Image (cartoon, grey):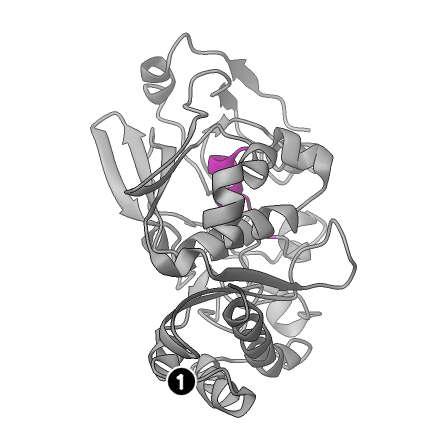
Amino acid sequence: MHPFALERPRDLSAALAFGAQAGRNDAPAEYIAGGTDMVQLLQEDVRRPDRLISLAGLLDGRIESGSQGLRLGAAATMAEVAAHPAIMEQYPVISEALLNSASPQVRNQATMGGNLLQRTRCPYFRDIGYADCNKRAPGSGCAAIGGENRWHAVLGTSENCIAAHPSDLAVALIALDAAVEVLGPSGQRVVPLAELHRLPGDAPHMETVLEPGEVIAAITVPANPAARRSHYLKVRDRASFEFAVVSAAVALDMDGSRIRQARIALGGVGTKPWRVPRVEAALAGASLDEAALRQAAAFAAEGAQGRGDNDFKIELMQRAIVRAVGIAGARA
């Protein structure tokens, strides 16, 4: 493990003054909250900051649900949010995404803000024995493109990176048009969650739009009738403590037996959490007939590019959409 200094600021303003940077390996200082992902990467020598700034006790951990929607403090844990009665009743897709993530022990420690900023599970990124990883070492190449890439993205990729984004929570939140409240040295700003994560392009080592010194303070979800009839479907290699091969978050506003509005996002297939507006548009006015759902789901494949081992994801993500929509649509 690379040696580092651990700073424990007295308040959030002092923490922000350190100018730490999230989501990139070349930052000399990084923030740490629950640390469930950070500590593992420190131990594996993947992350090598000179300084860690602890956010313990400095961020809001409240969970607030009302007529205007939902607000989740960044320090709320995955377990607290998943078990909250209002979220289970009004936003089941969020609760299901969290309960399908990690292990109970990790969920008790991991924070909501940290979950959105966790790093990819690409084995070439997480194993320093592989030198070619543009996300870890800019300009070194991408070993996954010509290597074993079953776990990798088919949407939003570039010739520099095909690593899939790992968060289940982010997929559920993007389907609900969530946003993040960001605090930094210049004050507060609101970033739609769909714009928080960058596509890899020619700079895959820059994963988010957060500036030095900025932290996620809270997550907000606007009220919407579709949130109650929602579902998170996760396809994975084993039943627990496994990341998604493909996942689908679905929220439906129904008019009798027909879909008035659909909100759909995919995980495990994109370099960032992936919304599919063409599928949503095709589902407007459709019934829950499987043939109609299948026809709409085919739009998810637009722009998808397999790299050999992960070609199967293009078909699987369409099947996941059909199944998730069917489950959500059957809910009262």
Q: Residue at x 55, y 75 (%)?
A: 326
Q: Is residue 197 magenta?
A: no
Q: Residue at x 49, y 11 (%)?
A: 8
Image: 327 above or below 286: above
Give the residue pinned by disc 1. Answer: 286
Image: 31 above or below 91: above
In percent of width and height, residue 172 lies at: 48, 55
Residue furthest to the left: 186
Magenta region, residue range: 111-120
Image: 16 above or below 199: above
Q: Quadrant of residue 282?
A: bottom left
Image: 177 above or below 49: below
- Asked if residue 247 lies left or right of residue 104, the reply is left
Q: Residues within 10 Å of mark 1 (few under 14, many from 20)?
A: some
* Image quarter of the N terminus: top right
Determine whether the residue tagged by mark 1 lies in a helix, strand or loop.
loop
- Asked if residue 198 lies left or right of residue 295, the reply is left
Q: Quadrant of residue 20?
A: top left
In percent of width and height, residue 226 lies at: 39, 61
Residue furthest to the top: 10
Q: Residue at x 58, y 56 (%)?
A: 133
Residue 117 seen by the camera: no
Of 148 and 36, nearer the camera is 36
Residue 255 seen by the camera: yes
Of 208 and 204, nearer the camera is 208
Amino acid type, mark 1: Ala
Q: Is residue 114 magenta?
A: yes
Of 50 and 314, nearer the camera is 314
Q: Residue at x 47, y 61 (%)?
A: 229
Residue furthest to the right: 238
In percent of width and height, residue 255 lies at: 36, 74
- Asked if residue 224 lies left or right of residue 84, the reply is left
